[in-house]
Image (cartoon, rainbow, N blue to C red):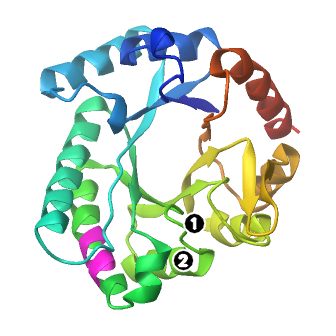
Amino acid sequence: MKGKAKKPADPAKAIDMSGFLDYCGLKGFEAAELTSYFFPPDADRDYFLDIKRQAFLKGMTISGTAIGNNFTQGAGEKMDRQIESALQWIDNAATLGAPHIRFFAGTGKELDEHPERMQEAVDVMKRCADHAAEKGIFLGVENHGNLRADQLLEIIHAIDHPWVGINLDTGNFFSDDPYADLEKCVPYAVNVQLKVNMKGPDRGAYPADFDRIAKILRDGGYQGFVILEYEDEDPYENIPKVADRLRDALQV
């Protein structure tokens, strides 16, 4: 299990990356995922190397990083800029010593409205995957942007790359049975992010069943990191309690 860097709701309680590594160690997490959004905008190679150095000295594994992108928006200047940024973040991950980077493929709505963009997204992801493979870094395509399980699996099968899998976010399937969606996708997971809520069209948000999710991961043969991605209120108060629940579920 590991922590994921998220901004606290209260700016007065915000912490930088070094502080986040300290927090993860204090709360007993084995590793930390360092999301690109929360690095300083002027972060350079020296900065990333210093974070790598600090993590090692603190006994904290950097399990991965994450970017936000959209490869189903259609070809053009915006796409070109996102490709350039994605390739740069693969290099950043290599400098950090992060073996995994979370990618978004795009949105389910754009794929439904523009089916031809599926191939565009796959082609771009293959290009990124080849670059990542040279650095020894896995790309995890997340079920983000209301991607359905069938769309996500189509993308993964079409990319068909040994350094590409699914970044499985347990709270991101917006369907009648998100647990069934998780079961379909977990055999391809290279990283798992666990949220405290699930969501569906008829129920809205509702509490996630940690025990059920843990069983799905075990039955699906998943052996990697499980990230606690906490996005709700009062993180400093609630994260330790949620982490204990998750540890109990994973250790059964």
Disc 2 is placed on an element classified as helix
Establish if 59 lies above or below 194.
above
Q: Residues within 10 Å of mark 1 (few under 14, many from 20)?
A: some
Residue 195 spot, x, y in % from top left: 67, 43
Q: Is residue 59 visible?
A: no
Which residue lies at the image location 70% right of the left edge and 64% below the top edge? Answer: 182
Counting residues from the start of the chain, the first of labels 2 and 1 encountered is 2
Say which residue appears at 37% left-offset and 83% top-offset: 118
Looking at the rendered structure, the kind of residue marked 2 is Leu
Question: Is 55 placed left or right of 224 in the picture?
Answer: left
| Residue 188 badge | 1
Q: Is residue 10 left or right of residue 91?
A: right
According to the picture, the residue beneath numbered tag 2 turns out to be 153
Q: Secondary structure at mark 1?
A: helix
Q: Residue 168 at what x, y percent from top left?
A: 58, 56
Q: Which mark is residue 143?
A: none
| Type of the residue with mark 1 | Tyr
Quadrant where the image shows the C terminus? top right
80 relative position to 229: left or right: left
- Between label 2 and label 1, give the one nearer the viewer: 2
**25 over 189 or under it: above or below:** above
Asked whether residue 244 appears in the rendered view, the answer is yes
Q: Nearer the viewer, residue 131 or 145?
A: 145
**Prevailing secondary structure class for the magenta stretch in the rendered image:** helix
Q: Position of residue 104 (x, y in %)?
A: 40, 60
Judge whether 71 appears above or below 36 on screen. below
| Res. 132 image quadrant | bottom left
In magenta, the rendered stretch is 120-125
Q: Mark 2 and 1 residues: CB-CB less than 8 Å, in contact?
A: yes
Q: Pointer 2: residues within 10 angstroms few (<14), some, or many (20+)? A: some
148 left or right of 107 in image: right
